[in-house]
Structure formats: structure tokens, C-alpha cells
Image: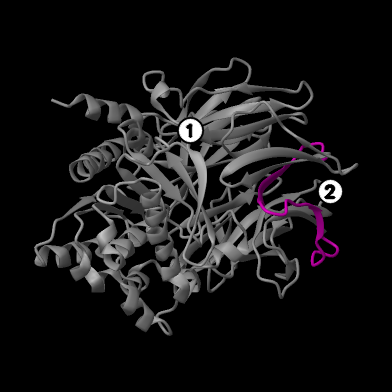
Amino acid sequence: MATTSEETLRSYLKSYRAYDPSVIPDQQAITFLTNKTGLPQVWKWDGRTSEVQQFIELPDRALSVNHSPSGEKTIIGSDINGNEKQQFYLISEQGAMVEELVISKEHFHHFGGWSPDETKIAFSSNRRHPGYFDVYIMDIATKKEEVVYPYDGNCNPICWTKDGKGLILSIADTNIDNSLYIFDLETKAMTKIGKGSISARYHSIQLTKDGKKGYLVTDAGRDTLAIHSFTFDNPAELEQLSQIEKWDIEEIKLSSDEKLLAYTINEGGISRLQIYHLKDKAIFEVTGLPSGVYNSLSWMDDAELVIEIKSAILPGDLWSADLKEKNTKRLTYVGENKDIHHLWTEPELCHYSSFDGLEVPYFLYGKKDYAQPVMIYVHGGPESQIRNEYNPVIQFLAAQGYAVVAPNVRGSMGYGRKYVQLDDVRKRMDAVADLKWLVEDLVRRGADPEKIGIMGRSYGGFMVLAAITHYPELWAAAVDIVGISHFKTFLENTGPWRRRLREKEYGSLKEDVDFFEEIAPLNHTDKIISPLLIFHGRNDTRVPVSEAEQLNRDLENQGKEVELIVFEDEGHQTENIKNQIEMNTKIVAFMKKHLQ
């Protein structure tokens, strides 16, 4: 029989969310994804009735939703058992018909937009070679596919040009930087957007209806992302429209009357929403929304915005902001959990100084005196960021009396290009040292040095393993979820489409194997003194399950305390609710055993 705490944990894990909203053109309706049935599926909010119902049920998880310009057809992406190999299905007649559209189950597919006349779609796939993503166009009526741009690397179409004669392509240059090109389908000419010599990020492109102008965010020549415009006559010249000196502008959305640009600002892991008037260049703040992280901006009409909002105490729901009436409204209540909502806690944003004086931010959940057991949660990426978002295990542990500390060590996104590059290649262990200095700071503030645990997912899993091998005396327990145990074996076995880009961050098999051997947790397992719990998905195409198996085998041979759980029906993420319950129940029991 489950204990009260186990039952409560299940309640935390069954706090579902609504995310990735997409307005259906001309229908006063919005589709969104939610995992409330156990796996992410597509649901719909009807603006005429405010009712929510399932849009379509697929046998596996839904990954993306792409409505045609008229709203009459929809293409949904879905994979198999979490392997991220997305296939496309055509949905018509309001979800009554499901038709296989782009199917090649051994390959990846990235959607690149509907043509303006809805007769064609663009997508990229690695069918020709595991590491090469060519650009395809498919005729919807005939299902005929054509490779229009072969590319020996990672290339994805973003959208069509407004005249239907070209595509905007994004080519990955490094693990974070990319280049945008205007690709002419007839002449095959490629025209770069922005200066060719500057490495930068280019995101969130918006095109005007006349096909003459575009808007985007980029950090070209800057430390943070800012809004720029360009013209198709002279796309190399970017005009800066709006910037925040210290923070990234993350997402922009052009209103249908093309008078306004809505945009989000990432201010230390918490979002702000502003509106830019293109004619008079005035800026105003949208207020009345809950504090948190804002994603997936969509315009319902010229004056009403739809936003996904999530926070530490809001798992995720859809909201609207009416700019004309100056009011905001919650549209869905998927994330509502009245049974345990009162137990959730807002984190405090704190900072500490690392070994070289660098100021490192972290979110603190729990009491402010640090006297209780501490669990440090390390994010993945590495170019990711802990933000003010709901995490069921963090919330549960905080409610159980833990201080949960979630740092954004050097290498994290959200603090500018300089900060994100502070852990590149042979500076990798500086980020691990940040964890050591975090522990020392926590102990100075009153934390019990005998009751500190650490956990992380993906690259965060590597950070856990590096921490317990290079600073073994600091940790009472550790949890590694789909983590990297050796960069050499990781790069050798990960998907070829990822290897070249990952090498820009981690170092290359050609030049940095000596460094990989020096820092590899797998080569320092003799130093591990803390119990270790490991989780992995059998179908992980990012970090192969072999990374977990080789580590577990080595520790078992040494007679050390280790347990490996492999989920046969998962990939890099843990999506199935039964697996989430099993994994997190084990994590909580493990932490209780070793930290209290």
C-alpha cells in the first residue's frame, strides 16, 4: 500500500500542463498540447464556447501542430516511443480524418511550413545520410516529394516566402549559432540574411504580407538578442529596433495588421511581455499576467494575444491579453491542481560568487536558512537555463523539508554570449567548479555538509557525474538521468546529425580526446563515494543508453552502491506518466534514505 507521501508525489506528477498554443486561422479557436491523458496529445480551446476538448488522438505522443493558412487542414508531428523521429500526419475535417503524409520511420523530419496556397509543404530529413538534413518539398495532393536543397549538415526550412517562390532556411553553424538564408526555389540562389562574417543566433523570423520586409531577433555584434528588421532588397543590412542591454529578447510575433510586434524578454529566468509600435516606435508593457515564463505568442486578432504561461506554481496554461480593452484572461485550467496547489512554493532568486569572482544565479526553493537537507538540481543543455517553471520533484522535495537549489552555472543561456561560452571545450571543468563553490557558499549560510545531494538530466547528468568524481567528498547522494559518462564514447555513439554541432561545445574527436580522457567520469569512478541512482531511455537518440550501461557496469564491478533503471519505451525525455511516477518515486525515496 502506498504511503501518504507517495500518494502526494503522484499528485505532484499528475499536475498536467497546456503548452505550444497555436491559433487556428479564421476559427476563433486554439490548439495546444497537453499530457493529461498520459502522453502529449493535441487539444482545442473553442473561443465561442470556451470549451476544451481533445482535437485528435494519436497512438504516440504529439510533438508539433501546424495549421494551414486557411485553418482547414492541420499537420501533426508524432514519433515512436520517444525516439524523436518525427513523422507527419494530415488532419482534415476538424479532426475526423487522419492521413499518413510524411512517413519514413527510421528518419527525422522537421516541418518547414505550408506554402501560401496550401498545395505544398516544406520539410527537412536525414534520409540521404544520418548526419545530413536535406530540404524537401511535398505536393499535398499527389504526395510527390522532391529534394530542393541537399545539404551536408544540419539545415531546416523555417517558412515560405510570401510569394510562394522561396523558403527561409536555417543552417546550424555551431551548437548555438545559425545562419538564415533566402532560398529561391527556381534559381536555387541562396541569399544570406545579416552580415556573413559574424557568428550569431537568428530566431523568431516574421515576414510582412507584401514580401518586402522581415523582423527577427539576433545577437549579431551584441552580447544579447535584440529585435532587428531587414528588407528582401538588401537582407545583409539589419536595422536594430529594440534591445535590452542585459537580457535576451526571445520571441517576437507580428500582428496581422502589421502595426505591432509583441515580444518576450528573459529577465533572469522570468519573462516580461512588451509591445513595439512599428510606426511611432513606442514601447509599452503588458501587465495583468501572472509572473512566470511566457512562450508561444499568437495573435487571435489585431488586438488580442494568446500566450502560454508557466511558473513554479503554475504548471502551464493558456492566457490571453486584450490590448484594446487592457485586460487579461485565463483560457485553460489544465494546470490547476486544487489538492496540492497550496503546497507549491515560489523560489527566491539568489546569487553567489564562484572561484574567479563570477556571479552565478540560482533559484532557491524551501526555507531561507539552508539548515535542512539540500538537493542541488543541475540543468541540461549545457546551453539551457533553469527558469521559474513548475518542477514536480523540486516542489515535492521542498514541501518535504529540503532546500532545493537550482543554479545557472557558467555556460547557461539567458545571460549573454560571453556567459554561455565560459564553459566551452577545455573550460568545461570551470562549470563543475561552480558547483563546488556553490556548496561551499551554502555551507557558509548554514547548510549541513553531510546532507547535500545532487541530481541532473542529460548534460546535467554529466555535471552530476563530474561533480561526484572530481569533488567526491561534497555529496551524500547523486542521481544521473540520461547523462553522459564519457564525451569520447558519447560523440562516437550519438546521432551523426548532432556530432558536429556538439563538438563545437564539447571539443572534437580529432583534437580533444586527451582532454575527454582527463575529465571523463568513467575514468574516475574509483573516486566515487556517494550512492548513485541512474535512469535512461532505451530509445534515446541524443545520449545513447550505452553511456549509462558502461558506467553502471564499471561501478558494479567495483562493488559500489549503484542502481540503473532503463525505460524500454522512452527516449531522451521521460514522457509516459507511469514511468515518471516510477522514476520520481525512486528519486524521492533515494534522497530520503541518504540525506535525512
Q: Is residue 532 above or below residue 11?
A: below
Give neighbour class at mark 1: few <14, some 14-19, many 20+ (Cα, 10 Å).
Answer: some
The circle on residue 346 is 1
**Dividing the image into 4 quarters, which one contains the N terminus?**
top left
Q: Image check: 554 left or right of 240?
A: left
Q: Is residue 235 above or below residue 591?
A: below
Residue 210, image x, y percentages: 84, 48
Q: Hey, which quadrant is residue 285 in on the image? A: top right
Q: Image check: 253 left or right of 9?
A: right
Under tag 2, what secondary structure? loop
| Identity of the residue drawn at 41% across and 69% down | 429
Under tag 1, what secondary structure? loop
Residue identifier under label 2: 210
Residue lying furthest top: 49
Q: Amino acid at mark 1?
A: Glu
Task: Reply yes or no: does residue 235 show up in magenta.
Answer: yes
Nearer the observer: mark 1 or 2; the answer is 1
Front residue of 31/323: it is 323
Task: Reply yes or no: does residue 211 show up in magenta.
Answer: no
Asked if residue 397 can be seen in this view, the reply is yes
Asked if residue 176 can be seen in this view, the reply is no
Q: Is residue 88 above or below residue 307?
A: below
Q: Amino acid at mark 2?
A: Asp
